[in-house]
Structures are given as structure tokens and as C-alpha cells.
Amino acid sequence: MGIQYTPPEVWTFDETNGGTWAKVNRPTAGATHEAILPVGKQPLQLYSMGTPNGQKVTIMLEELLAQGVSEAEYDAHLIKISDGDQFSTGFVAANPNSKIPVLIDHSAQDSPVRVFESGNILLYLAEKFSKLLPATSAEKTETLNWLFWLQGSAPYLGGGFGHFYVYAPEKMEYPINRFTMEVKRQLDLLDKQLANQQYIAGDYYSIADIAIWPWYGNLVLGNQYNAADFLDVNSYPNLQRWAKEIEQRPAVQRGRIVNRTWGESWEQLAERHSASDIDHVLKLKPRN
């Protein structure tokens, strides 16, 4: 047992006690500084970073472009969340919750449309372009079941397991055990779901796969939190099969590197303003 902690009668913010993200975490909303968001030439303007939530949207946009939807061309501007870019006046106007990603659609006739929350951005784009979301009521509902599952489950992986296993200032047994148990339950759920079908919601690739892969696909492939051995991910063969198949999609390989500033040189593209930006970076990838 660790040292017993007794909560105070009234909680107060200790800005020194936050681990890796202490300098940007705070208990209040709103802007901290003045800054205008840049606007490029494409119809869609994305403000993001290549985290799992950011990858959802860039993969979606690249999938749309791969399917011939030229109206899905986009500029992807880097928001450095460790520097607090998400607390600028421009970003807060786009998303009062100060979280990436944010999409601004300038193709609207009346005025630009802001779209925040990664799952909502996927749904917005799927409905806007009639792609990657089934038309039949039953299949659409099943797809949205899993999209909303991801939106509710990923915080246990990221803010729960990932935080205490990787980012917390000290390792604590109880929260690591608590969130590891939940993450393994989620992995087992996905593995069972994929036992008799190719994709998450059925035998069709959809926004459910696009939403879930950046979190759970990256995790079981060893690209997230360096926790593959700890979580014994090889015990989920169906999930492994799915994760590897999705990883091989050209649009996934393109989208996963956008707004990324870490990793190998061929994985880093801070900003994307045309398809050639991605082409240039991917040429750096070693050939097997």
C-alpha cells in the first residue's frame, strides 16, 4: 500500500503537480493569449497535431481524396499543444474546449462552419461527401455504435492508462492496475468483435475503423505508449490482423504522418498544404 492520501475539504489547483503536461493543464477554460489562426487556400482548414485524435481526421481526409473526392482537399496547420497553442483566441473561437483537432469548412455558402470533437468531424465529413458511412439504417447505426464507443472508451486508454503508465510524475500501482484492466477488457472486446468479420462494424470499411485504429491499432502494433509487451497484445490475434490490414492502406500511411513532429524522418510532416507535401516525406521511408 502507498501513502494514504486524504482529499482536502476544498480542492485547489497546484500547477507544479501535473507531470509532463503540467505547464498547459489548468482548471479554467478560455484563451490565454492573442493569436489568429492561419488560413490556407484549400476548402477545408484543419488545426491539429498528429496524436491519435488528430490522426483520425487526417486519415479520413486522405481516404476521401483516395476515393476521388477533390473537395476534401485540405490545409493541415500544426497546433503545438505542449506550447499551449490551443489556448489562443483564434483556436478558442474555433473550439471553446481548447482540444485538437478542429476543422473549419470554408466551402459553406453563408459562412465558415466550425467542427470540433474528432468523432463529430468524421461524421460531418462522411455525411458531407456520402462516403465511409453506410446508407442503410441498420449498417449506419452499427457504424455509429462503434464510433460512439470509441469516443467514450479512448479516454480510458489515453487519459487513464496512458497517463498513469507513461506521463504521471510517479508510478502508482492502483491507477495503473485499474486502467490496465479496463484497456485489456476493451482489447478483448475488439478482438471478439473482429473474430468473424473483416472490419469493426461489419464487412465494410467505415469511419468506425478510422476512429478506432489510431488508438487501438497503434497500441497493438507497438506504436503507442511502448506498452505492447505489458499488455500482452499478441493474445488478441483478430485485433492484430485488423490493425495490420488497416496499416497497409495507402491513405492511412499518408494520414498518420500529418501534423506529426516526432519519430523517424519519413513519419514527420508538421504541416500539409498539398498532396505533394506527403509524397515528399514518404519518399524518405527505407525500402525493405
Image (cartoon, rainbow, N blue to C red):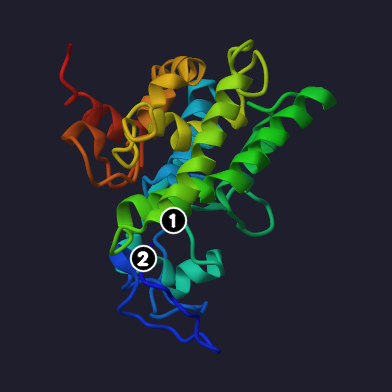
Quarter of the figure that contains the C terminus = top left
In the foreground, 259 or 200: 200
In percent of width and height, residue 112 lies at 60, 57
In percent of width and height, residue 214 lies at 45, 35
Number of residues whose C-alpha sits closer than 10 Å to that of mark 1, classed few (under 14), some (14–19) or many (20 or more): few
6 to the left or right of 185 = left
Helix, strand or loop at label 2? It is loop
In percent of width and height, residue 63 lies at 50, 26
Helix, strand or loop at label 1? It is helix
Q: Vertically, is 169 above or below 132? A: below
Residue 45 visible = no
The amino acid sitting under disc 2 is: Gly
Quadrant in the rendering for residue 97: bottom right
| Residue 2 marker | 2
Quadrant in the rendering for residue 1: bottom left
Q: Residue at x 41, y 46 (%)?
A: 75
Please name the residue that numbered disc 1 is placed on. Answer: 174
Q: CA distance from mark 1 to mark 2?
A: 9 Å
Marked residue nearer the N-terminal end (1 or 2): 2
- Mark nearest the camera among 1 and 2 is 2
Q: How many marks?
A: 2
Is there a contact, CB below 8 Å, between mark 1 and mark 2?
yes
Number of residues whose C-alpha sits closer than 10 Å to that of mark 2, classed few (under 14), some (14–19) or many (20 or more): few
281 to the left or right of 186 = left
Q: Residue at x 63, y 26 (%)?
A: 132
In the foreground, 87 or 25: 25
In the foreground, 64 or 96: 96
Q: Vertically, is 259 above or below 85? A: above
| Residue 31 marker | none
The amino acid sitting under disc 1 is: Tyr
Residue 17 visible = yes
